[in-house]
Image (tube, rainbow, N blue to C red):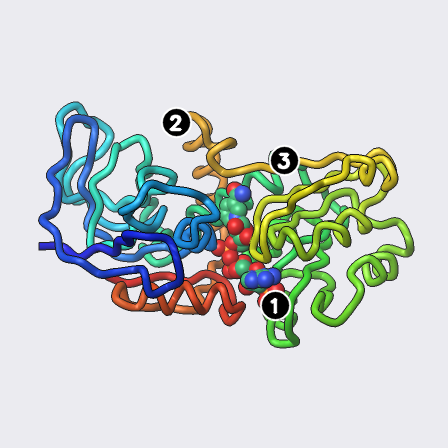
Amino acid sequence: MARQIQFDTTGGPEVLKLVEVEPRAPNAGEVRIANKAIGLNFIDIYVRTGLYPVETPSLMGSEGAGVIEAVGDGVEDFAEGDRVAYVLGPKGAYADGITLPAEYVIALPPEIDFETAAASLLKGLTVQYLLRQTYAVGEDETILFHAAAGGVGLIACQWAHALGAHVIGTVSSAEKADIAHRNGAWMTIDYTRESVPDKVREFTDGAMVPVVYDSVGKDTWADSLACLRKRGLMVSFGNASGPVEDVNLAELNKGGSLFVTRPSLAGYADSRERFEMMCADLFDVLISGDVKIHIGQRFGLDEAGAAQQAVADRKTTGSTILLP
Ligand code: NDP
């Protein structure tokens, strides 16, 4: 038998239940993976609360890392015993193991351990497309990145620093500011008590920034637009404080012909070729040491609800993983 987290209705962390099931053998094109570590992402909270609707009952979790236990017919790229990670496939990573199509699986280089992989695949691929594709961050550019001490944030601070950029990161406490600085942030702003546009104006001598990466959503939308220089790009990629609604396009005109995009990882890693290219880029910065994964919290699989609550309550730094 294997344990997995499932939920029958959307709601608070208490809806997550640990149940025992018979592991499913892989069908053609699928593999069975024994999880060694599971990545917890803010998106899991959107799914549990119903912000991102799924059919219930549903499984939970989008990424993990482990060892292939069995392969289905027609799978040629993987074999039993391979060290792998997976992302973007069907929900169900919060479990002892998962059976899923091989197209969502990537072989792990020997230098990357399971915990690092589970803590960084979804978040690191997100940073890959944000900094290298959505807006190609260049040397000596100054960028604004919200929630800089979070899982995605700490990877972004280090990767942008390695690209030669100056990151202004927002955080909610002095402790988080310190962590962001130690991970490559040039300046930090405590957005719970400081004016973000005023601080950005001060740090940039009035020039403002060409791009803002905003995963906080509702609470930061207006301030983020106010931090952009003319024709700057607003990248709204998350809803930690709630979704951005009722956008008035005239605001983009008023800000100086601003651009806005609302990207997702699925929209960028939308073919096997692109997925592999993005993984190769991420693995390069992990292996070179340009990006080190900070695992701030480890929880047991049976503590999934508490783990999600800690992230939702802004009590975490860096990545959070579950251990089966
Ligand atoms: P984080 O570890 O970054 O946790 C979220 C952080 O957001 C918190 O630690 C907190 O940092 C900040 N925050 C600001 N306001 C709130 C609020 N009202 N409630 C809760 N948190 C708040 O999570 P992840 O690294 O997993 O994800 C970061 C963001 O990126 C999420 O919004 C997620 O949805 C988004 N994302 C988007 C993807 C995409 O492709 N579009 C893919 C992956 C992630 P502080 O206390 O410093 O304010």
Q: Which residue is mark 2?
A: 272
State how far apart marks 2 and 3 are (Cα).
Answer: 19 Å
What residue type is disc 1 on? Arg
Q: Residues within 10 Å of mark 1 (few under 14, many from 20)?
A: some
Q: Which residue is mark 1?
A: 182
Residue 233 lies, in percent from the top left, at: 74, 39
Residue name at image x 80 percent, y 37 percent: 252
Whether residue 16 can be seen here: yes
Relative vertical location of residue 72 with respect to residue 141 in this rendering, above or below: above
Q: Is residue 187 left or right of residue 60?
A: right
Question: Element type at marker 3?
Answer: helix
The quarter of the rendered structure image containing the N terminus is bottom left
Residue 69 lies, in percent from the top left, at: 14, 44
Residue name at image x 44 percent, y 37 percent: 280
Q: Hey, which quadrant is residue 219 in on the image?
A: bottom right
Q: Which mark is residue 134?
A: 3
State how far apart marks 1 and 3 are (Cα).
Answer: 26 Å
Q: Nearer the viewer, residue 199 or 180?
A: 199
What residue type is disc 2 on? Arg
Q: Hey, which quadrant is residue 20 in on the image?
A: bottom left
Q: Which mark is residue 213?
A: none
Q: Residues within 10 Å of mark 3 (few under 14, many from 20)?
A: some
Residue name at image x 42 percent, y 25 percent: 271
Residue name at image x 16 percent, y 26 percent: 28
Q: Hey, which quadrant is residue 75 in on the image?
A: top left
Quadrant position of ligand 1: bottom right
N-terminal-most mark, 2 or 3 = 3
State how far apart marks 1 and 2 are (Cα).
Answer: 35 Å
Of marks 1 and 2, the one in the foreground: 2
